[in-house]
Image: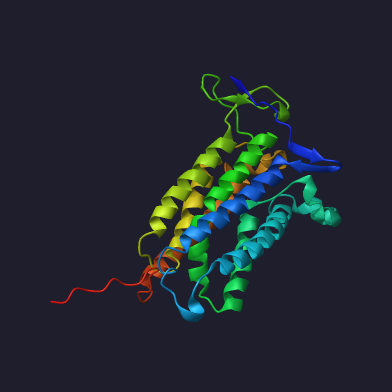
Amino acid sequence: MLIHPKIDPVAFQVGPLAVHWYGLTYLAAFGLFFFLATRRLRHEPYASLQGAGAWSKRDIEDMLFLGVVGVILGGRLGYCLFYKPAYYAAHPLEIFFIWQGGMSFHGGMLGVIASQWWYARSRGKPFWQVMDFVAPCVPLGLAAGRVGNFINGELWGRAADPSLPWAMAFPQSGSMLPRHPSQVYQFLLEGVLLFVLLWLYARQPRREAQVSAMFLIGYGVFRFIAEFFREPDGHLLWLKDQTGMSMGQWLCVPMILFGIALWVWAQRRPEHSTAPARPRRAG
């Protein structure tokens, strides 16, 4: 059985300033987004847009800034509302204590959607064109976040068969039970695999909003699967015990359903793809 190495959460310290690994993984996530987004500018339809509708690195910088704000505000508020509403209703000032931890992906996603809606409206760009641009650039950033979870030894998995070669004990859990390293599962599923599939999917001509729809479906399905191996937060065990599903799985259900509905809606719209139509051959 493997044992979590209990990595110091502080990467380095300069005087009184402590830089945490988790903060560095957030920086890595934003850096990966910027790198991939600049490559995305070469994809259609973004590479062919001209005039007021043209895309540039300045657009990426503005989208990234607003996205960071959306991730932090949405992630924090989502955690407070979805996971500990009673606690934060009784201690409202602690909503602002983000250094204590507590971020929700689903809340962060809603924050990003809101920030990109504002960006699209302020710049006169089609909302779904913006979201289709963003979607393939996100999963590797999510993978970086899971690396931070593993370094911190948090969000460990459920008890595993001791014969499982990669079963790992997390002393932070209060026991030495062999567990699934669910952070690694989520890194591979929601991060690497989703990125590969979505990046390849987005390279082909798609109707507007279908790339966004596939992100919702893909992440929702992979997160739903990963939750079978992830130990629910202690204050949410009652939900799994009573319904058989964790809070993460419940939040993924509307995400998947909305993604399917969005894809079908886009498919039935008058053809408007994310790549310019190829000219037909004469004759």
Left or right for 12, reference 206: right
User: Hey, which quadrant is residue 232 in on the image?
Assistant: top right
Question: Above or below — where is 126 with respect to 37?
Answer: below
Q: Position of residue 170 (x, y in %)?
A: 67, 27
Q: How is the image coloured?
A: rainbow
Question: Above or below — where is 263 with respect to 147?
Answer: below
Is residue 249 visible in the rendered structure shown here?
no
Q: Position of residue 64 (x, y in %)?
A: 62, 62
Q: Quadrant of the N terminus?
A: top right
Is residue 141 visible in the rendered structure shown here?
yes
Left or right for 193, reference 93: left
Left or right for 65, reference 165: right
Q: Position of residue 143 (x, y in %)?
A: 56, 45
Q: Quadrant of the C terminus?
A: bottom left
Q: Residue at x 74, y 54 (%)?
A: 80
Q: Residue at x 61, y 72 (%)?
A: 119
Q: Residue at x 43, y 48 (%)?
A: 196
Q: Nearer the viewer, residue 88 or 17?
A: 17
User: Hey, which quadrant is residue 177 in on the image?
Assistant: top right
Q: Nearer the viewer, residue 118 or 35?
A: 35
